[in-house]
Amino acid sequence: MVIFILSKKINIGRGWLANSVAIGVVCWSVCVVVLIRFLGDRWWPGTLLLFSPRVLLALPILAGLVVWPWLAKPVKVAVLAASIAVCWGVLGFCLPLGHLLASPAKTYRVLTCNVANWAGGAERLERLVAESGADFVMLQEYDDRTRFTLPDAWSVHHEGELLVASRYPLKNFSIVPRELPGRWPRAVGLFAEAVTPERTIRLYTLHLLSPRYGLDRMIDSRTGLAPSRCDLLVEETAKRESESERVARAIDEKDGSFLVGGDFNMPVESYFFRQHWHSFYDAFSTVGFGIGYTCFVEKRGIRFGSRVDHVLTRGTWHALRCWVGPDVGSDHRPLLADVYWE
């Protein structure tokens, strides 16, 4: 009824059906963008959409494009605006607009990857490290029972499932302990300093809590979704918020410039990411191109991705280029970034 009234008000004549469809698509797009961009990790339906197959959420915009020739001019403007909003707010499409004119004399290459306990072996990542020319490597879910060989003369330090490696000497290691007992690894963050000929570079790798168990519990084999079972997701979300705030505060207490890489288990649209990590710049958001999905899962025969792995810069560090690397056998893809000191 609302769509019909709006259609009549804009005097669309014989194209009322096409315009009604388009207005419905615009309303859907606005609702999804608001839920993901502003309520993700603040309200469980927003969190559910935050980690859902977003391409499916964006598909209705195609209906507006299909009926485009029959649309009134105001509706065309609304559909065009909704399409841009969906690309930005739902798909998370990025353009490499940051630091277009930068031409630094010296850059460093950072590689971060959740290796999922070497589910696919270490050989492909070893080859990528050698071929990519990486200067710093940060790994999560690292298992030292699997042989992982770095180039000669590299410096390596690991704490539990976290590893930092550098072609330059490393020193001054410390951790941010995880406060959850039991099976969780005891370190959520690992700090190190790399001593290069130009300067000492401060590095942090981390692996924050995941909402996967709460999301899995809400999937029902018959109905597809069981909202009544949202309690675990709500509980996990509270723990994730507490941990994200605590780790971000621990890093903020260390003055100076930082490079941070790791599996945050949250996209940039997450309220926690925007609230707790606002003092950092996300490399892919700044200089990446495309949607940059780094983690892929399959649910009910649908394979989809999300951008939960990040390289962040702070202070006088800036990103020049950022891209997703090839499949190395994990459910996460490596994320690489070229960074420079200004």
Image: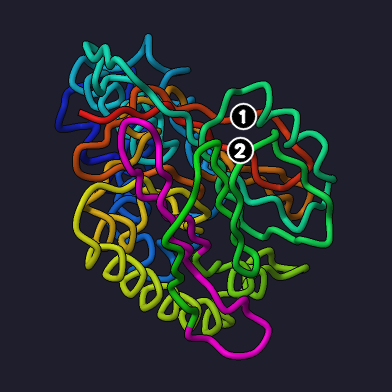
Picture residue at 29% right of the left edge, 39% below the top: 4
Amino acid type at image mark 1: Gly
Quarter the C terminus occupies: top left
Q: What separation in Å lies between label 1 and label 2 (alpha carbons)?
A: 5 Å
Residue 186 shown in magenta: yes
User: Residue sitting at 24 percent across and 47 percent down?
Assistant: 257
Q: Mark 2 falls on what kind of element?
A: loop
Determine whether, in the image, residue 198 is placed left or right of residue 215.
left
**Which residue is rendered at x = 31% and y = 60% of the image?**
271
Which residue is nearer to you in this view: 273 or 22? Answer: 273
Q: Are marks 1 and 2 in contact (CB under 8 Å)?
A: yes
Earlier sequence position, callout 1 versus callout 2: 1
When the figure is inspected, residue 167 is found, relative to residue 120, above or below; the finding is above
Seen in the picture, residue 197 relative to 253 is either above or below; the reply is: above
Extent of the magenta region: 179-207
The crowd level at tag 1 (other Cα within 10 Å; few <14, some 14-19, many 20+) is some
Residue behind mark 2: 334
Secondary-structure class at tag 1: loop
| Residue behind mark 1 | 325
| Residue at x 75%, y 61% (from the top left corner) | 143
Q: Quadrant of residue 259?
A: top left
The one nearer the camera, 181 or 159, is 159
